[in-house]
Amino acid sequence: MARVPLVESEALGPELEPVSEYFRARGRELPELYRVLANAPRLLLAWTDFAWPLRNEAALPRGLRELAIMRVAQLTGADAEWGSHAPMALHYGIDQDQLDELERWPASERFDASQREVLAFTDELTSGLAVDDETFSVLAQRWSPGELVELTLTVAFYSCVSRVLLALEIEGG
């Protein structure tokens, strides 16, 4: 059970109608994370203004971003994040064997070069809070400056998501 109340969908004010409509249009209930964040409506709107373009409008391939998100969830122990993003990772080309071996990715043969580069970056930024020059320069040879910003924001944002989920004991992403 979350540490703060879950706001019922019916209790959302008119300022959160775009958030409600987003999920209704997809035939989904408002996730627990959003119901918790709705306790601070202006911040929930700011959250979605950042999160949704990051998820849906980035140029970096979605499968790579979902792989990074899954690794962040694994490194931070955010089970709700893992549960929310596993279906998306699978949908965008990450296979179940890769998810099963993600914890052992450096020794696994299941990840290609670009995935390994993204995972090294994700591990360094999530666990060490910085990325060394060698790791970054390898990525910079493959991706544009804009894509590098997208990757950095994805890993950093989903590290934030993990921390919110864990601090507020949110079980459903």
Image (spheres, rainbow, N blue to C red):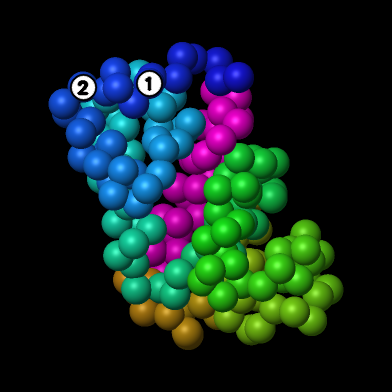
Seen from the viewer's position, the closer of residues 127 and 12 is 12
Horizontally, residue 121 falls left or right of residue 105, namely: left
The reply to whether residue 115 is in sight is yes
Identify the residue shown where x is 43% and y is 24%: 36
Rendered view: 153 above or below 2: below
Please, what secondary structure does the residue beneath circle 2 have?
Answer: loop
Q: In the image, what residue type sits under mark 1?
A: Glu
Label for residue 13?
2
Q: Which residues are magenta?
A: 148-173
Identify the residue shown where x is 59% and y is 67%: 90
Rendered view: 126 above or below 141: above
Identify the residue shown where x is 34% and y is 67%: 58
- Residue annotated with mark 1: 8
Q: Earlier in the sequence, mark 2 or mark 1?
A: 1
How many residues crowd mark 2 within 10 Å: few (<14), some (14–19), many (20+)? few
Occupied quadrant, residue 152:
bottom left
Which quadrant is the N terminus positioned in?
A: top right
Report x, y in % for residue 83. 62, 47
Chief SS of the magenta region: helix
Please, what secondary structure does the residue beneath circle 1 have?
Answer: loop
